[in-house]
Image: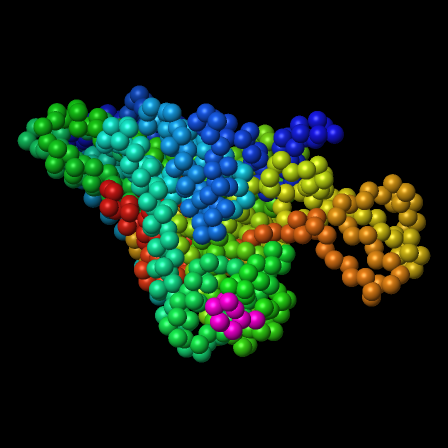
């Protein structure tokens, strides 16, 4: 039932897409919006356009040329023979490049290198269980009619890596669901609190397919479902009221658990940064960035002479630290930029290591960007205190013993191809890497830092040792 | 002269590193007319049996009694000001712990009754806590800790702790043969007081130099120390020297037990020895101390910013690599306050001692890291491992 209501609404943009196919892709650097705030008031067509842009951008400039072959894809199908089209798509997917020109298919070398390397990883015993990250099939997703366009757009942004960072992704996801709930209309015979989770679940599944939502996102979704369930207990409210309640609740959740939490964390953590200190940070974390910026602002306000230094440690292939570096040095903080191999030489002069994280497991292990464990290990060796800044909504009840059992496989595109043209084998013939069956380029996105390497965790409830995570979790579950 | 110094002493001390909070807001400014929390605190602490946190709570209870506020909010505001005054003026971390506890109690007991009866119940509960519960804490700890003391064991304790003494006396009463090494704990030399009390009670006690702790450790069965505060990491803030005693004990694999009442638990997470919220020493200090702090900064044991120029020519004469010392002005070399006058000819006759100023720049407390502590014995029941301190604090204070 619910599916049909959205199928109606998505047929219009589907037509719009046909006319749009030949358009030039917008520049790759199109900046992604953090949350779904901006989408308010935009028509479905606009959303669609943005989504297309994002998808194209994700594919990269090299593949932009193949766009010209794509227009045949939707035009050969009429809008009402949707299921037929889907079958074709699946068929084409399985058959690979073998189909004739009339059969709609993905461009032949669409992310081919990564797909191949991924397949070798999949064969590898250790990593075969990890979710494969393939670019999402947006057209199929839209034609099912079960997905709100904003969710599709979000999925593309997440999977392409334009929306990165646990906080940004969770905020994006929750604001997207807020929009979905606003647009949602409960069917006549159904009850909202029973129907809404069913309506949402394919979207959640689709987002999970684009990129695993992580502990923080999982907690947020679990909270949302419990809020919807609670509507059932309350009863006696009109649909509009219930929707308003949910929309408001999501807003409060984002405000309290992420925005205010970050503010309090910044207030707490900046106390630990003192005049003349050298602070080491790894890759990029929105919270750590905020802590450093606020600490700098406060220090300058109390004494213009005062200041501290920041060492941004970064590593390939994501090089996220550059963004951090830009923000920090832009604010007037004196920064040093190094790559991970140099860390041990720098640490003897460091006073504090500040880390962000994607999750904190109940044994106190920090799940964060791969490389974090090395940073903390070296810091411990040099007896530099390691402070992880993590909001409590990222606390997970699982215990993860290593970085292999649950992780994500990142794109290996840039792993072998260096930006300066020095590539593995011969740069001009990328096929060498592609055909090399003995080569497994591996990029795991996260790693696990054991609690023994973390001095303190800075949360919105104050500084706690990693061993206190279960206590906080226990309290949180008794409150919710 | 006095007219010149008084404005100086009120101006905030130059903040180099560390605690840059303005010291000592003008004495008890906003609190109930004329009532001085600091005086109340000082009066309470004069009693030898009253520890810092309890004295702080007593002072705050007295503040409530003296308060003329007619609403809960008004009272809360006065209390907040009182608390801040206490925290910012008194050097003991126990004060902060007591204030935190009282704040928590105040917040939890709020609401319900009408204001006068609420105020009365606050006062009576505060008084009964200080008069009855607090001394009971020490009793409970002694009861628990005495089980750890075997017959015929040798204990090393540091400085002076009422709880430790009470525990040892309790064991003595149970006819356990106990021998005690106690450190001298310079410069306060409170170890001597421990020695006095124990010897008076017939317990064999020997005073050990602070520098002889490692020497004596092999003869020791266990280390028992008291504390000023227990911090959230599970570490111990205690009179200076405890950390090195703990390090030696760890190196020699001797059990290290800390005794702490639960009202000494403090919501603070120190990352280093200097990361403690101790306010700079009394801002109404004399001019000499002000100047002295100007030289050394607020953090204990900082190097002086002005280096005393001792004998550079002597070095340069022997060192061919050194540049001609024209840039080092010897004539107007500033004399750093507190430098002892160099001993003259008969050096072996005249002992050069630390001056008062040198002692002053030394820390009063240090942080013993949780990895060195076996158990913290508290009044909360079974001895806590350092990690459970934080669990207790999180459960108590965050909601």
Coloring scheme used: rainbow
Residue at the spot 30% in from the left edge and 55% down from the top edge: A398
Asked if the stretch drawn in magenta spans residue B265, the answer is: no
Location of residue B169 (image quadrant): bottom left
Q: Quadrant of the C terminus of chain B?
A: top left
| Residue B374 visible in the displayed image | no
| Residue B225 visible in the displayed image | yes
Q: Quadrant of the N terminus of chain B?
A: top right
Residue B258 in the image, given as x and y percentages of width and height: 45, 62
Residue B57 in the image, given as x and y percentages of width and height: 41, 42
Location of residue A345 (image quadrant): bottom right
Residue at the spot 47% in from the left edge and 38% down from the top edge: B40
Q: Which residues are magenta?
A: B198-206
Residue at the spot 82% in from the left edge and 52% down from the top edge: B341
In the image, residue A415 sits, relative to residue A45, either above or below, namely below
Is A477 in front, or is A119? A477
Q: Is residue A309 left or right of residue A399?
A: right
Location of residue A236 (image quadrant): top left
Residue A5 in the image, given as x and y percentages of width and height: 15, 29
How many marks can you see? 0
Q: Is residue A289 left or right of residue B376?
A: right
Residue at the spot 34% in from the left edge and 41% down from the top edge: B126
Residue A425 in the image, given as x and y percentages of width and height: 54, 58
Name the residue furthest front.
B200
Name the residue furthest left.
A189
In the image, residue B240 sits, relative to residue B327, either above or below, namely below
Q: Is residue A137 left or right of residue B309?
A: left
In the image, residue B146 sits, relative to residue B326, either above or below, namely below
Is A473 in front, or is A447? A473
């Amino acid at each position: 039932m619910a599916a049909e209501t959205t199928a109606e609404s998505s047929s219009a943009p589907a037509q719009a897409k046909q006319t749009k196919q030949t358009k030039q892709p917008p520049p790759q650097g199109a900046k992604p919006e953090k949350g779904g705030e901006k989408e308010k008031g935009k028509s479905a067509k606009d959303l669609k356009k943005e989504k297309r842009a994002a998808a194209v951008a994700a594919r990269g400039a090299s593949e932009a040329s193949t766009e010209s072959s794509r227009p045949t894809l939707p035009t050969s199908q009429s809008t009402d023979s949707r299921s037929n089209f889907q079958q074709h798509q699946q068929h084409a997917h399985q058959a690979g490049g073998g189909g004739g020109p009339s059969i709609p298919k993905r461009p032949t070398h669409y992310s081919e290198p990564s797909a191949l390397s991924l397949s070798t990883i999949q064969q590898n015993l250790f990593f075969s269980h990890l979710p494969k990250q393939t670019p999402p099939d947006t057209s199929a997703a839209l034609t099912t009619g079960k997905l709100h366009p904003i969710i599709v757009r979000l999925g593309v942004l997440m999977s392409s890596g334009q929306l990165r960072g646990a906080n940004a992704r969770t905020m994006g996801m929750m604001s997207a669901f807020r929009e979905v709930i606003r647009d949602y209309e409960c069917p006549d015979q159904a009850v909202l609190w029973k129907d809404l989770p069913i309506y949402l679940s394919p979207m959640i599944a689709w987002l999970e397919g684009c990129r695993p939502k992580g502990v923080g996102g999982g907690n947020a979704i679990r909270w949302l479902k419990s809020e919807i369930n609670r509507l059932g207990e309350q009863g006696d409210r009109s649909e509009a009221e219930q929707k308003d309640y949910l929309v408001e609740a999501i807003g409060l959740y984002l405000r309290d658990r992420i925005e205010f939490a970050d503010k309090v964390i910044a207030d707490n953590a900046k106390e630990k940064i003192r005049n003349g200190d050298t602070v080491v940070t790894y890759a990029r974390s929105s919270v750590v960035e905020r802590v450093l910026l606020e600490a700098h602002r406060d220090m300058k306000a109390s004494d213009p002479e005062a200041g501290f230094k920041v060492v941004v440690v970064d590593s390939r292939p994501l090089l996220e630290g550059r963004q951090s570096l830009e923000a920090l040095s832009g604010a007037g903080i004196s920064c040093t930029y190094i790559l991970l191999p140099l860390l041990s030489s720098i640490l003897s002069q460091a006073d504090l290591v500040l880390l962000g994280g994607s999750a904190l497991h109940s044994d106190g292990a920090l799940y964060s960007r791969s490389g974090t464990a090395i940073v903390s290990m070296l810091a411990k060796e040099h007896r530099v205190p390691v402070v992880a800044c993590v909001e409590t909504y990222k606390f997970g009840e699982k215990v993860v013993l290593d970085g292999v059992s649950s992780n994500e496989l990142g794109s290996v595109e840039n792993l072998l191809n260096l930006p300066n043209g020095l590539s593995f084998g011969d740069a001009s013939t990328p096929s060498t890497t592609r055909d090399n069956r003995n080569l497994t380029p591996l990029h795991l996105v996260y790693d696990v830092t054991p609690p023994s390497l973390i001095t303190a965790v800075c949360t919105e409830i104050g500084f706690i040792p990693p061993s206190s995570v279960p206590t906080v979790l226990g309290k949180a579950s008794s409150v919710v | 002269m006095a007219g010149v110094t008084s404005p100086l002493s009120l101006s905030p001390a130059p903040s180099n590193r560390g605690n840059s909070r303005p010291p000592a807001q003008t004495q008890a400014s906003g609190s109930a007319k004329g009532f001085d929390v600091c005086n109340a605190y000082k009066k309470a602490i004069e009693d030898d049996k009253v520890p810092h946190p309890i004295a702080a709570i007593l002072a705050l209870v007295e503040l409530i009694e003296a308060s003329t506020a007619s609403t809960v909010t008004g009272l809360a505001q006065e209390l907040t000001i009182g608390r801040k005054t206490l925290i910012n003026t008194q050097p003991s971390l126990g004060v902060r712990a007591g204030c935190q506890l009282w704040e928590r109690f105040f917040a939890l007991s709020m609401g319900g009754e009408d204001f006068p009866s609420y105020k009365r119940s606050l006062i009576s509960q505060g008084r009964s806590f200080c008069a009855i519960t607090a001394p009971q804490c020490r009793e409970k700890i002694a009861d628990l800790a005495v089980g750890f003391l075997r017959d015929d064991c040798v204990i090393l304790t540091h400085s002076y702790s009422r709880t430790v003494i009470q525990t040892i006396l309790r064991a003595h009463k149970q006819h356990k043969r106990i021998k005690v090494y106690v450190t001298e704990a310079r410069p306060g030399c409170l170890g001597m007081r421990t020695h006095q009390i124990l010897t008076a009670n017939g317990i064999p006690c020997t005073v050990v130099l602070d520098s002889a702790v490692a020497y004596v450790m092999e003869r020791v069965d266990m280390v028992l120390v008291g504390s000023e505060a227990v911090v959230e990491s599970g570490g111990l803030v205690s009179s200076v020297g405890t950390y090195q005693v703990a390090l030696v004990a760890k190196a020699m694999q001797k059990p290290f037990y800390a005794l702490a009442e639960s009202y000494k638990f403090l919501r603070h997470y120190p990352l280093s020895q200097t990361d403690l919220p101790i306010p700079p020493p009394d801002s109404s200090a004399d001019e000499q101390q002000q100047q002295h702090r100007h030289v050394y900064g607020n953090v204990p044991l900082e190097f002086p910013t002005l280096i005393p120029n001792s004998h550079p020519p002597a070095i340069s004469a022997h060192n061919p690599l050194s540049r001609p010392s024209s840039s080092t002005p010897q004539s107007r070399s500033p004399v750093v306050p507190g430098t002892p006058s160099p001993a003259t000819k008969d050096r072996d006759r005249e002992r050069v001692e630390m001056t008062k100023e040198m002692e002053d720049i030394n820390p009063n407390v240090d942080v013993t890291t949780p990895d060195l502590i076996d158990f913290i014995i508290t009044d909360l029941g079974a001895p806590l491992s350092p990690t459970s301190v934080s669990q207790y604090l999180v459960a108590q204070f965050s909601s």
